[in-house]
Image (cartoon, coloured by chain):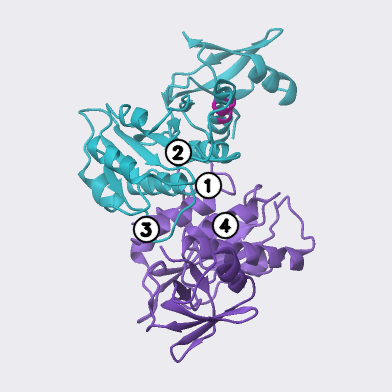
Chain colours: A purple, B cyan
Amino acid sequence: MPHRYFTTEISNGTATLRGADAHHLSRVMRGKLGDTVILCDGNAVEYTATITGFGPETVEFSVEPGYPSAAEPSVEVTLFVGYPKQDKLEQVIRHGVELGCTHFVPFFSRYCVAAPKKEEQKNERYNRIAFEAAKQCGRGVLPDVALPLPNFGALCRSLEGYDLVLFCYELGGAPLRQLLADAKPADGQRLKIALITGAEGGFAAEEAEMAANAGVKTVGLGPRILRCETAPLAVLSAVMTLTGNLE
Amino acid sequence: MPHRYFTTEISNGTATLRGADAHHLSRVMRGKLGDTVILCDGNAVEYTATITGFGPETVEFSVEPGYPSAAEPSVEVTLFVGYPKQDKLEQVIRHGVELGCTHFVPFFSRYCVAAPKKEEQKNERYNRIAFEAAKQCGRGVLPDVALPLPNFGALCRSLEGYDLVLFCYELGGAPLRQLLADAKPADGQRLKIALITGAEGGFAAEEAEMAANAGVKTVGLGPRILRCETAPLAVLSAVMTLTGNLE
């Protein structure tokens, strides 16, 4: 399988790769004139590209007409993830990207054990992890990680524009397949789904009430208690399975 | 929610807890006469139990009639997991137990990067991790971890007695929902499913051929390339979703 790189510099049948990726292709992979790679514009369009030249820090290509990336799911998922302890958020981002999640929004909530600390620096790191995961697993877009929301109220005010908002609550709720079957996307659009999962401490009763008032659907993930780093991956896998995006 | 403990010493309306769990209940939780806990026999039967006495290293209970554990899925899943590097096998076991897996069988294969080393010692640790995860997530049975199989041939000779054996192959296969819909359990039994996922290096072509000759069904997990620690959790979540065990 040819290597894949993201670049936005694709136009008129040519393309350019810069920076670390250009270095990787020319020095590490020892790419040669005439070699073929896949370029992705980060907007779900991919191109078969042939190396036509090397600059000091660039690689130049001629590209064939683009085609839609096969790896993008038919649903656009945003994961609102309760900020967990240690490096668990990195795990959730890494594996979530593989499972087709497009946007990550960490949030703090009443029972969070983690507290905000150097979040701008950490956010750079989280986005780098998402980028690397997207390259490795073959995504057609670059998933992004937002700066964390300060509390659950801020989360509830961020839920506009989704076709379905699912609140994964430890006390249970409706089956996911029923909620998904009832959801309809806007005309000609992908179904936009928001998933909300909690941190180690779970949700306070008043947070569950705030979520209900914000119009979310409460979903149950079965009788076993899932850890805060397992629940996002389980519900992402379930959503992708039920929408035909894990087959 | 009352605390839960596993014990096999339950008979004639009484029960005994020993060792670390007895210490935990009497010293850490400061249990008192008349307090109620849930005891589970590790065989998917649970009991509401009332503390009737404390010995030097035991706790004694009177128990009400048992009832089936609500947390056990309706399918019995064995995960054959390619032996990964670092501590990834521990992650797979921990999260796999939460997702309802009952048996774990690590195996070495052609492209495994990990090599066997002190496996008996490690196996004790893996079983302890499974035990702790089972307690924490509320399982009704104690999932077990086998000693690793030395190669893929040994795996192919271990596939008797399952209603469905699914080989998760990076080159794709049939959709999981179709394969599951076609599977039927033996009369009055739970559906017994074996899942096979690879290590970092994936499978060699001749291993895929051996699997096919052993009668497995090859299943695809979508167009994104899943890491070796993500694939088991994705396919477990998918199986549990499609069999109604993640709702």
Determine the residue positioned at 28% across, 53% down.
Answer: B175
Query: What amino acid does circle 3 point to?
Result: Gly
Query: What amino acid does circle 2 point to?
Result: Gly
Please report whichever mark, 1 or 4, sits nearer to the chain's N-terminal start: 4
Which image quarter holds the N terminus of chain B?
top right
- List x then y, in percent, for residue B47: 49, 22
Secondary structure at numbered mark 4: helix
Chain holding disc 1: A
**Are there few (<14), some (14-19), or many (20+) residues within 10 Å of tag 4?**
many
Q: Are marks 3 and 2 on the same chain?
A: yes
Labels 1 and 4 touching (C-beta < 8 A): no
Q: Which residues are magenta?
A: B125-129
Chain holding disc 4: A
Chain holding disc 3: B
Q: Which residue is mark 3?
A: B222
Q: Which residue is mark 1?
A: A171
* Nearer-the-camera pick, A218 or B217: B217
Q: In the image, is residue A5 above or below residue A95?
A: below
Determine the residue positioned at 46% across, 25% down.
Answer: B146
- List x then y, in percent, for residue A147: 68, 69
Residue B166 left/right relative to B10: left
**How far apart are the alpha carbons under marks 1 and 2?**
35 Å
Residue A94: numbered disc: 4
Residue A19: numbered disc: none
